[in-house]
Amino acid sequence: MFGLIVALSSLFVVVQSEFEDLKTEVFTVEKTGKWKGKADAHVPMLDIEPIKGKGGGWDGKMWTTHVLRDEHYIKWHWVEDGDGNLIYKHELGPTIGEDLDMDLNQTSVFTIPKGTKDPLTTYSWCTVHGTWAHTWNHVSLYQADEEEEKVDEHGKKIEEDEMNKDGMTYKKRSEVPQHPKVNPEALKEFKEKVFSVEAPGQWRGKSGEHVPMLDLHPVERGGGWVAELETSHGKDPTDFIMKHWVEDAAGKVLGVVDFGVEDEGETNKHGRQVSQFHVPRGAKEPLTTYAHCKQHGTWAHTWSTLPLEQHHGDDGEL
């Protein structure tokens, strides 16, 4: 997943043990312990964007949506790499007065150097509800060197025209998913009430398994993008993900994927539902990803910091 960063903060390289005393008990979306219903405001989210040019690495942004009160607030954000090393920390609170530390929105921006071991884990510490974390197992920190032979996840060599100068793998045009056109009116009933991380309504504590995450993969020769959505919901006859879809900023539906509770496969199983859509060049940003659950309704996230501009040659749209 990618995100534009409006500012950068300095990188901290600190001893691993600095926050160990805050990790004696760590809560997550899946394990909220005594704080059931508190995950939405506490679990720190993450966006990263590759840094172009020599040196590589990533610009990172993490955020929480907690209240800011004198005695109840998020005091710390921090990030650890796959070895548990602390690569970034940020102190927050009502007396610090930062523009990125506000009621219902605490944001930290940082740099992830090339060579950092994945997966990243983002942490937040609340003065009342303790430490919360999420490990981003599906966010890869791989960047190919110019002289390095480039291979895909199966070890197969990737031809040079399938990659840009930053080592990003392109989807072949034959790999682009095709979906029938859908009139936005057909989804109107599913959007009468839409929940989100920031506004979970009566379903507080449920956003982690319902809000659809997004990865974008460029298509070769200026063919737009392939958007991959993922939710982490269970499968029960009365409670399962029924649909994924994507809309651009103009309200154009880029495709709909339906899931059946009896279907079983890599893209639809207990704890993981995956769908892919073609985002053509000219689609209006930002994209909004949607997921509809049989029991808990429709959930969405608008990726307002995600750019759709492509800088590479174009020999015609798909």
Image (tube, rainbow, N blue to C red):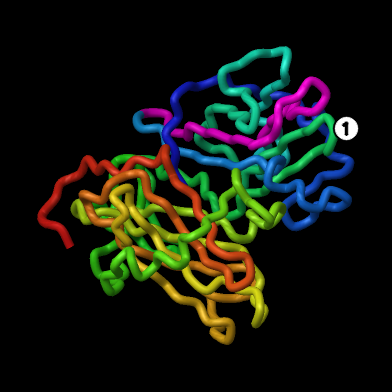
Would residue 246 be found to the left or right of residue 17 on screen? left
| Rendered location of residue 238, percent (x, y) | 66, 79
Which image quarter is the C terminus in?
bottom left
| Rendered location of residue 133, percent (x, y) | 72, 44
Would residue 264 be found to the left or right of residue 161 on screen? right
Residue wearing tag 1: 21
Seen at 68% across and 46% down, the residue is 40
Q: How many marks on residues? A: 1
Residue 275 found in image quarter: bottom left
**Extreme residue in the left direction:** 315
**Extreme residue in the bottom direction:** 262
Task: Confirm whether the magenta stretch covers residue 77.
Answer: yes
Most foreground residue, 60 or 280: 280
Disc 1 marks a residue whose amino acid type is Asp
| Rendered location of residue 203, percent (x, y) | 68, 57
Query: Circle 1 — which element?
Result: helix
Residue 139 can be seen, yes or no: yes
Would residue 95 be found to the left or right of residue 61 on screen? right
Seen at 57% across and 65% down, the residue is 297
The range drawn in magenta is: 54-79
